Image (cartoon, rainbow, N blue to C red):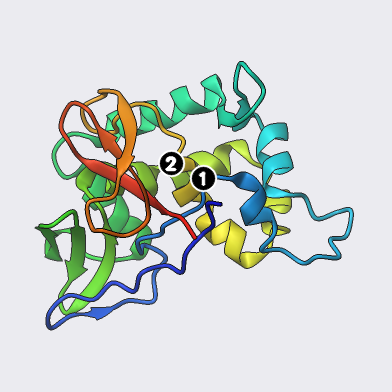
Amino acid sequence: MVTPSTPESVRTAGRRARHCRHTIYCPSLRWESIDRQGPRDRPDEIPTVESLLRSAGVLEPTADGTDLRLAEGFAEAWHERMDQMRGGDRALRWLAASEGLDADALDVTEADDRYVVAHGDETVGAWHSRAGFLAAIVAEPTIREWVDAARLARLPDAPREELAARLVMCLERCPTCDSALAFEDRRDGESGVALRCRGCGATVAVSSIA
């Protein structure tokens, strides 16, 4: 069964990880597993992640009804925002503004399926690729546009913090080149799958299996 793993702590030589949320997650492919992270005696007013996202028009059943996928409207809105951020350093500047940092002082390192953004000796965040970075940072404001803030705030902390990472695993087109995405075995030898672009080869996200 696919279950969420503990987020990787991001550390690079000589740098210390910040207190920010931008860390690599290996989320589950099953939405019911994220709901199990909440309290077992769930009050009626606390929505499940699946019910919240379906009622907000973020997720919808697949044609055969056996799984969930991104709803067309939400997917289009998300991709439109990613398209706006593709060029130059727009995405980095947006990240800097959201974190209250000087964009010109950010340093980017790309190597070994890692896209790491640092500010001085602190790691601002790490993703598996620039495509993964773009998808993740754009996901959060898009979610806030579609999901009622009060209902979103009632989710338990862990599911809420992993929400963007899980939605990234639902993408069907690459954030940077718009080619088709497909699940493949992970290249790091760990159990699970990786969501990779068939065009540019970027690893957008990974999911672990326990």
* Vertical order, 206 against 196 (above or below): below
Relative side of 112 to 19, left or right: left
Question: Label 1: which residue?
Answer: 29
Q: Quadrant of residue 195?
A: top left
Relative side of 49 to 172, left or right: right
Identify the residue at image location x=89%, y=53%.
Answer: 44
* Vertical order, 176 against 23 (above or below): above
Residue 20 location in percent, x, y?
39, 70
| Image depth: mark 1 or mark 2 in front | 1
Q: Are marks 1 and 2 in contact (CB under 8 Å)?
A: yes
* Vertical order, 93 against 60 (above or below): below
Identify the residue at image location x=25%, y=23%.
Answer: 179
Residue 42 location in percent, x, y?
84, 61
Relative side of 114 to 186, left or right: left
Q: How many marks?
A: 2
Identify the residue at image location x=69%, y=59%.
Answer: 36
* Vertical order, 71 against 89 (above or below): above
Q: Quadrant of residue 12?
A: bottom left
Any mark on residue 56, and which? none
Give the amino acid at mark 1.
Answer: Leu
Give the amino acid at mark 2.
Answer: Met
Give neighbour class at mark 1: few <14, some 14-19, many 20+ (Cα, 10 Å).
many
Residue 180 location in percent, x, y?
30, 23
Question: Label 2: which residue?
Answer: 169
Mark 1 / mark 2, whichever is N-terminal? 1
